[in-house]
Amino acid sequence: MITVRIQYFAILREQRGLAEETLATAATTPAALYDELRTSHAFTLPGDRIRAAVNDTFVASTAPLRDGDRVVFIPPVAGG
Amino acid sequence: MITVRIQYFAILREQRGLAEETLATAATTPAALYDELRTSHAFTLPGDRIRAAVNDTFVASTAPLRDGDRVVFIPPVAGG
Amino acid sequence: MFRISPAPLDPAALLRALTDARAGACVTFEGWVRNRNEGQPVLSLEYEAYIPLAVTEGDKILAEARAKFSLLGAVCVHRIGHLALGDLAVWVGVTAEHRGAAFDACRYVIDEAKARLPIWKKEHYASGATAWINCATRGEHGSPDAPPPA
Amino acid sequence: MFRISPAPLDPAALLRALTDARAGACVTFEGWVRNRNEGQPVLSLEYEAYIPLAVTEGDKILAEARAKFSLLGAVCVHRIGHLALGDLAVWVGVTAEHRGAAFDACRYVIDEAKARLPIWKKEHYASGATAWINCATRGEHGSPDAPPPA
């Protein structure tokens, strides 16, 4: 298990009901963590429409997660 | 012979030394009138680089000139 | 220079900051909150940004524009917060010796900004409904985040 | 709306006149007097217009832009008179629902304006020489209207 800090924005923030939380997880990638959270909180956006940032940098959804990472899931942007 | 009013702009105004004049001419087209004036006043621009306007409308250089017309010869524009 | 601003943008001041005696052309883009989106009357908008990454990504976009086009200056500022109709949501200003580069770069910056910046827009409709733009998914009919009808 | 102005242009006022709640995009072009042209230091510029035809032709260009692109508003104002470095020589502003039309139309208007309006530009150089741009002809070496050296 690792402990990560998660920040939520926009539709994810509203569906989660909070802007950030600290969580212990067995997930080892952003994709796995999102799936776990999606199940718990009924997020409507499927994982393939979400990008991930770790420690304020875009990462692949299969990048490794480490203890203490700050994770942000990025819903589709406004796009104009 | 017809009498026309001619306005000069930019390099033509400077080379003519005045901004407008009224002239009696045997020329029957703007092209012929420009040739006449070019000879008299040593305009440096050849006729094929000049456009003509009669009574504030662009016209072909071979359009007919009529008594009382207001003629403007248009040097190449600034073009950016 | 890329910035996220919680306060109203001042285009005159932004323009003044681009003053450059070598520049012959300045092209600006302003994104305004408009009163309809896809046929639905809009009352107001909320913009929310993931600021640290938006700033990094915004600076990257401006650096790309400078690398691709022959520019003298390039600025982009994006509002966040609750905006009313007609409010200025995003401002891009680019200067160059010649206008071709200025137009191309200004368009590049706003196109990339809209596609890449982690900034989200929530529309408030006359009907009372709201929608996070581009975040709609199937099967949400009647939910507060349903997309506006086409 | 096309205008020739002997007085300095006020971009903020011009922009305000384009206010439109339906507009999502506003693209502006500003042409500034720059300090060099083709390598030659420039001190100032004079613009001279054949006003009645410039206004007719300017209105025609704006009407063409409205016919070609999906616009809400389009304005072009051109300065005449003696301008200093950094002065605003020409301003184009275009509004549209979407930015693609606004960019395309703004560029169309300035490209056509520069090619078609009967407006001439005389550059004053640091050397004391002057030149009517695009009016140079061969064999003028040493004349006050000689082109700037390449």
Image (cartoon, coloured by chain):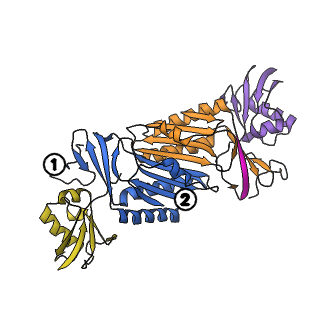
Chain colours: A yellow, B purple, C blue, D orange
Q: Chain of mark 2?
A: C
Residue at image point 73% right, 56% down: D41
Q: Which type of secondary structure does the marked residue at label 1 adopt?
A: loop
Q: Nearer the viewer, residue C110 or B27?
A: C110
Q: Is residue A44 above or below residue D7?
A: below
In this picture, residue D112 sits left or right of residue D136: left
Residue D144, numbered circle: none
Give coordinates of residue D118: x percent, y percent.
66, 37
Residue ID for mark 2: C73
Residue at image point 55% right, 42% down: D11
Specify few, some or many for label 1: CA neighbours under 10 Å numbering under 14, 14-19, or 20 or more: few
Q: Is residue A41 above or below residue B48?
A: below
In this picture, residue D132 sits left or right of residue C47: right
Residue type indicated by callout 2: Gly
Q: Which type of secondary structure does the marked residue at label 2 adopt?
A: strand
Check if residue D29 falls in the magenta segment: no
Find the magenta span and give its range. Answer: D39-48
Q: Are marks 2 and 1 in contact (CB under 8 Å)?
A: no
The residues bearing labels 2 and 1 have C-alpha atoms spaced at a distance of 45 Å
Give coordinates of residue D117: x percent, y percent.
63, 38
Residue D137 visible in the displayed image = no
